[in-house]
Amino acid sequence: MSFDHLGLMPELLRAVADQGYTEPTAVQNEAIPLVLTGRDLLAGAQTGTGKTAAFVLPILQRLHATRPTAARPLVAPGRAAAGRSIRVLVLVPTRELALQVEESVRTYGARRPVRSTPIYGGVGFDPQVRALRAGPAIVVATPGRLLDHAGQGTIDLGGVEVLVLDEADRMLDMGFIRDIRRILALLPARRQNLLFSATFSDEIRRLADGLLDRPAVVQVTPRNTTAELVRQVVHPVDRERKRELLSHLVRSGRIDQALVFTRTKHGANRLAEQLARDGIVAAAIHGNKSQGQRVRALADFKAGRTAILVATEVAARGLDIEALPHVVNYELSMVPEDYVHRIGRTGRAGMDGDAVSLVCVDEAKLLRDIETLLGRRIPVEVVPGFEPDRSIRPEPIRLRTGDGRAIGGGRPGARPGGRAGAGRPSAGRSAPVHGGFVPARRPGIGNPRPASARPGIGNPRPAAPGQLTPVRPPLPRLGDRGQAPAVLPGERLARRADR
């Protein structure tokens, strides 16, 4: 099937053709017609399957086909940003994904542009204020910086007609559930909601139950599976020889360009420095890098000027790197699902890729957990000259640095690799227990209480006329869903009825 059969307007079809695409992916084929009808949507697909275009294309069409609704002011009069109402809000977990989604809006809207802007932290506030005052129809934002703008009264979300949660499972992993609830409280009650996720975990289903109204469900790959085009292999190696083995694989030509994952920011920096001393061009990318440093490192990697990009989990999702040949798990992730997200950076868009894991004796249980999640064993290959020493005993994983030194693991209750009480834990952050580590409990995600007692994440009731909605309001409660009006193709955007 071609894009011609999905009901997209000629300008969008030409923009898609300009990018060299002729046939929609499975998620695009199923999701685009549903989004065009105005239905709420819960969509799951592996990374690299075209999820961004699956919501950007129909949203652009519906913005051209309908007029903006009258915005209900949700911030103090005179404080909100000037200009036309924001009609579409896309929430994403990372700065890189915000930039990439907004770039897709401009790419697919090239033949009939729609004003858009990305909003994310780590850069100046005032330029974003000016961009908001210019009146974008689409805002792509990370939760924290969006709430900063809401607190300063520089953004008006009262006219939002479509909400997209992209990489929703990643946002839950990063501890954004409370920020998401606060943002939902600032939005109109009537809107279309689209939730995209790489996996359909139980937490995602609970989020969807409170957010979506009788959604269509699209799942084009089985839950927690890896891309079929990714060849996976485990290289057993002693913990102190991992860097030496990685350098050997690069020098021997078995790995030419790779995204390499470590558990900690310090470990990423140290490994990049060690590889550079080995004569390998490498750079690190993680949350402590400035936005400019991250953009430059990613640009150099995409252009082939850097052979190895060492990353923490911040890069596990959302990075759009075409034709990435290798992903290397220098250290296995503490959370099995993160392994799936990591290796999903390769084997994209119909191209083969390799996922290489350097596994020491300490990580045997982590490997078993990953294989249990995948439902199969990962092939093991011992590299000659790097046979592991069977006499070495396993040690508790202390979120080691690049040279194997333990950090942050000795003090009970400590949060290795981050600030205590930071409030937004990185995916996979763990807490010590009985000398080892277990995945930390995610904020707001646990065994659910009955719906009548559980804090909700649905749409709040609108404020009474003249009443100001607080910037960070109390968490809204789940209420009974109203009946959504019937929507036919070509009608105005369907949005949820007031409760």
Image (tube, rainbow, N blue to C red):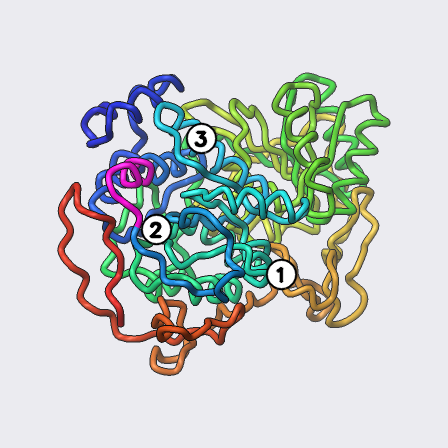
Residues rendered magenta in the picture: 58-68
Q: Is residue 67 magenta?
A: yes
Q: Amino acid at mark 2?
A: Val
Residue at (34%, 51%) from the top-left corner? 162
In the image as oriented, which residue stretches furthest toward the front? Answer: 78
Which x, y percent locates residue 351?
45, 22
Residue indicated by mark 3: 106
Q: In terms of depth relative to the viewer, which is nearer, 260 or 320?
A: 320
Residue at (69%, 70%) from the top-left corner? 433
Whether residue 229 is visible here, answered yes or no, is: yes
Residue indicated by mark 2: 162
Q: Earlier in the sequence, mark 2 or mark 1?
A: 2
183 sits to left or right of 330: left
Q: Secondary structure at mark 1?
A: loop
361 shown above or below 251:
below
Q: How far is the residue under mark 3 from the one under mark 2? A: 18 Å
Residue at (45%, 53%) from the top-left corner? 168
Residue indicated by mark 1: 424
Q: How far is the residue under mark 2 from the one under mark 1? A: 26 Å
415 sits to left or right of 177: right
266 shown above or below 278:
below
Q: Secondary structure at mark 3?
A: helix
Which x, y percent locates residue 121?
63, 49
